[in-house]
Amino acid sequence: MEVQGKIKMIGETQTFGNNGFRKREVVITTEEQYPQHLMIEFVQDKTDLLNNYSVGQDVKVSINLRGREWTNPQGEVKYFNSIQGWRIESLQPAAADANNIPPVPPAEAFAPADNLNEEEPDDLPF
C-alpha cells in the first residue's frame, strides 16, 4: 500500500530495551477533501530513510498495516494497529543545478551555413 501527502512532523529516533530496537515516527498529511494526519513508524534500519526529508516536503510512503493482540494482567484481550513504513520517495522533481547544466539556446539562435563549397573533399569516414 502507499500513502501520499505532505510531511507534517518527523520525530527523533527512539531506542528501546537492551536489544537496541529503534523506531522513528513521521506524520503525513494527506491532500484530499478531508485531510488525514497519519502517523507512520519506521523501525530498525528503516529509521535512516527519513534523514534526507524535511517538514513540508511532498512524499509517497510505502506502508504495511500491522496488528497485534495483547492480553493485559486482568485477562482482557486488546488489539492494536500500526502503520509501518518501509520506503519513502519525494514527489517533488529534483531541481536542475543551474551551475552544472548550461541552458540550451533555441534553434532560431543559429544562422544557416551559407559558405558551403561543393568542391571541398569530403573527409568524413561515413
Image (spheres, rainbow, N blue to C red):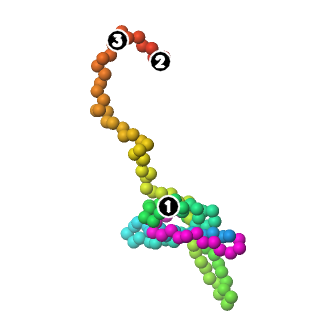
Q: Residue furthest bottom?
A: 74
- Residue 42: name its quadrant: bottom right
Q: Does the magenta portion include 6?
A: yes
**Residue at position x 68%, y 88% from top?**
73
- Residue 86: name its quadrant: bottom right
Front: mark 1 or 2: 1
CA separation in Å, label 1 and label 3: 60 Å
Q: Does the magenta portion include 55?
A: no
Residues shaded magenta: 1-19
Name the N-terminal-most of marks 1 and 3: 1
Name the N-terminal-most of marks 1 and 2: 1
- Residue 83: name its quadrant: bottom right
Name the N-terminal-most of marks 2 and 3: 3
Q: Residue furthest front?
A: 99
Q: Which mark is residue 118?
A: 3
**Residue at position x 47%, y 63% from top?**
54
| SS for callout 3 | loop
The residue where tag 2 is placed is 126
Q: Which mark is residue 53?
A: 1
Side of 126 relative to 79 (left or right):
left
The amino acid sitting under disc 2 is Phe
The mark total stands at 3
The amino acid sitting under disc 1 is Tyr
Which quarter shows the N terminus? bottom right
